Amino acid sequence: MADLRVGVVGLGGNGRAFVRGYALSELAELVAVCDFDPERTAAAAELAAEEGAGPARYHDLAEMLERADLDVLSVHTPDHLHATPFVMGLEAGCHVLVEKPMGNTIEDLERMTEAARNSDRKTLVGHILRFNPFFAEVRRRIAAGELGEIFYLEADYFHNLLRQADPVRVNPHIGNINWYLEHEKVIVGGGAHQFDLLRWYADSHCIEVCGYGNAIAFPEMKHHDCMCAVFKMASGAVAKVGAAYGVVGPRPELCNLEVYGTRGTVRGGMLITGDEHEPDVEDLRTEYSGHPFEPEIEHFLRCIIDDSEPLIDAFAGANSAAPTILAAESVAAGGRPMEVPYFAR
Ligand SMILES: NC(=O)c1ccc[n+]([C@@H]2O[C@H](COP(=O)([O-])OP(=O)(O)OC[C@H]3O[C@@H](n4cnc5c(N)ncnc54)[C@H](O)[C@@H]3O)[C@@H](O)[C@H]2O)c1
């Protein structure tokens, strides 16, 4: 089987994790890495070399796309800089994986879905939690009807990310800013993980959202560092996501996921069904912890080789990002409800 020729753009911690994943994959040949920052490009190339790969180093994405003869472009730039590399990759004829959140504004999502519509290439948005065995098992149980009709769901992104204020994160190559402090919206960058899960479980899309927030715990962030939003789904279900970056202590177990259906409940990692007084309780938790980047990479490469549908393409990614973007707008507008557009193929 021919290896897919892969290039990675954006070589911070996240991009480097993917560099390693592609270098290890038997389905890929990591042929190119790109970052504005030469130190990061060198570090990524060294990491790849440890796994037996020898990618060419680039500092300009257009040049990499022109010269590296890529099948796949993997985009790991900051949230507010996903759209341009994604569109450039598709226009250059590449299959494109882009990190979550797919975009940071509705305009980004419109550009990106338009490019996907005009392309026959595959896309995948990096909603990593779908590749975690526990969260995937919850989806299997819902799809098998074990919870009945879903009417309420909630999950949280509660994280201590105060370290992101470190001056070392100021990047001279992207306007001399710390993008986390300037552009990050906690319910988009963080909460999109959880909202994507809830949307997957509800098997629906959001039609309206409203949210509240504050800037108490991490006031260095330009946008509110604590946001909580309620999402009205087309199915009739209601979902709630909390997101905060100034949280004391470790992240809550399993993102505080709770799913309520007419026949069953998922709470605390347990599937609860049956009689109210003598319920059947099944532990769905697994030993797995961490970020399943390698299964995500294998899934995308396998979809390209087999010509099958990726689990979360650009349209699904846009329908997971848009409600969170509008949740942040609702927070900024003091809780005003926002209508949410649907991105059709
Ligand atoms: N799925 C997950 O669990 C997960 C975890 C962490 C981060 N992320 C996402 O990964 C992305 C990157 O996060 P990070 O913390 O690694 O960011 P980072 O700021 O550390 O790294 C981003 C890099 O992209 C480079 N860059 C930006 N635009 C570029 C361009 N056009 N050409 C070349 N280089 C460019 C910057 O110079 C920088 O080195 C973000 O979208 C973040 O939300 C996802």
Image (cartoon, rainbow, N blue to C red):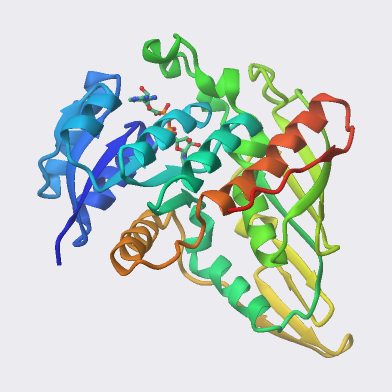
On-image quarter of the N terminus = bottom left
Q: Is residue 34 above or below residue 26?
A: above
Q: Position of residue 193 (x, y in %)?
A: 59, 49
Q: Is residue 19 above or below residue 266?
A: above
Query: Residue 309 falls in which quadrant of the image?
Result: bottom left
Q: Position of residue 36 (x, y in %)?
A: 30, 20
Q: Is residue 204 above or below residue 41?
A: below
Residue at image coords 19%, 62%: 26
As drawn, is 296 to the left or to the right of 27?
Answer: right
Residue at image coords 57%, 32%: 108
How many numbered callouts? Answer: 0
Q: Nearer the viewer, residue 190 or 83?
A: 83
Q: Nearer the viewer, residue 265 or 236?
A: 236
Does residue 337 show up?
yes
Q: Which residue is situated farthest in the front direction here? A: 118
As drawn, is 248 to the left or to the right of 43?
Answer: right
As drawn, is 6 to the left or to the right of 149?
Answer: left
Q: Quadrant of ligand 1?
A: top left
Q: Position of residue 224 (x, y in %)?
A: 73, 25
Query: Residue 3 falls in which quadrant of the image?
Result: bottom left
Does residue 158 show up?
no
Residue at image coords 81%, 82%: 263
Q: Position of residue 284 (x, y in %)?
A: 59, 76
Q: Is residue 239 above or below residue 337?
A: below
